[in-house]
Image: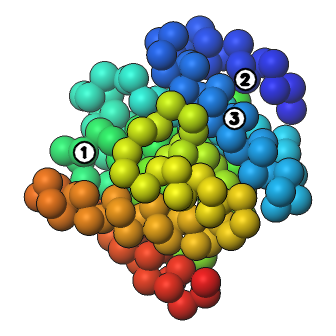
Amino acid sequence: MDIDFFKNEIRNTLSKKRYEHSIRVLETAITLGKIYKVDLNKVAIASLLHDYAKEFKREDLINLSKEHFSNETEEYLSNVEILHSYIGTYFASEKFNIKDPEILNAIKYHTTGRKNMSIIEKIVYLADAIEPKRDYPYVEKIRDLSLINLDKAILLEVTKKIEYLLKENHVIHVNSIEMRNWLLKVS
C-alpha cells in the first residue's frame, strides 16, 4: 500500500496539528519498527491512520460506536478519547479496504492497549505515547527504554498512565489494566 496516499488522506482529513502529530508517530514507529525488525509498511499505515477519527464530532463517534462496536464500547461512550480508536478501525477497513488484522488492531488499541498485543500493536501504541512532542513525567525514560525493551517501556508508560487516571479520578479502560497485568507476567 502506498504510504504517500495515506499521508495525503490524513492531510485532507485532519487539522494541521493532528496531521503533524501523526507524522511524528509515523517517524517514531518506523524507528522502533527497524529496531524490532517488523513489517515497516504495516507500521506506517497503522501509524498514519491511528488518529483518523480523532477529530470527528462527538455525536458521530458515539453513533458509529453504537452501530459497529456496541459490545466493546458500551461502557465508554462518554469517552471520545477511546471511541476514536474504534471508529478509526472502521474507516481503515471500510474506506481504505484494509483487512490486515495487525494493522486494524494497532489502530483499534493504540489508546488503551490490550493483553496479547502483537509487536506492531505495541509499536504503534508506544509511538503515539512517546513521539517527540509528548511532554509528561517519565516520557524521556520511556523513550530510552523503548530502544532496548519494548515491553518494559510499555509497562512503565501504562503504569504512569493508570496512576495519572486514578489521581484525576478518570475511568480506566479494562484493556489497559489487562495489558499491564499481562506485561508484568511476560517482561
Residue matched to label 3: 26
Q: Residues within 10 Å of mark 1 (few under 14, many from 20)?
A: some
Q: How many marks?
A: 3
Residue matched to label 1: 79
User: At 60% across and 46% down in the image, what residue appears?
Assistant: 127
User: At 54% across and 90% down in the image, what residue appears?
Assistant: 185
Q: Position of residue 60 (x, y in %)?
A: 32, 28
**Label annotation for residue 6:** 2
Q: Quadrant of residue 80?
A: top left
Residue 18 in view, yes or no: yes
Answer left or right for 18 relative to 44: left
For this orientation, the residue located farthest to the bottom is 185
Question: In the rendered structure, which amino acid carries the disc numbered 2?
Answer: Phe
Front label number (1 vs 3): 3
Nearer to the camera, 97 or 7: 7
Element under disc 1: loop
> How far, Cα to Cα, is label 1 from label 2?
26 Å
> How far, Cα to Cα, is label 3 from label 2?
11 Å
Q: Position of residue 93 (x, y in %)?
A: 64, 40
> How far, Cα to Cα, is label 1 from label 3?
25 Å
Q: Quadrant of residue 78?
A: top left
User: At 42% across and 30% down in the image, what residue appears?
Assistant: 54
Question: In the rendered structure, which amino acid carries the disc numbered 3?
Answer: Leu
Residue 91 in view, yes or no: no
Front label number (3 vs 2): 3
Question: In the rendered structure, which amino acid carries the disc numbered 1?
Answer: Asn
Q: Measured along the vertical axis of the image, is residue 131 above or below residue 103?
A: above
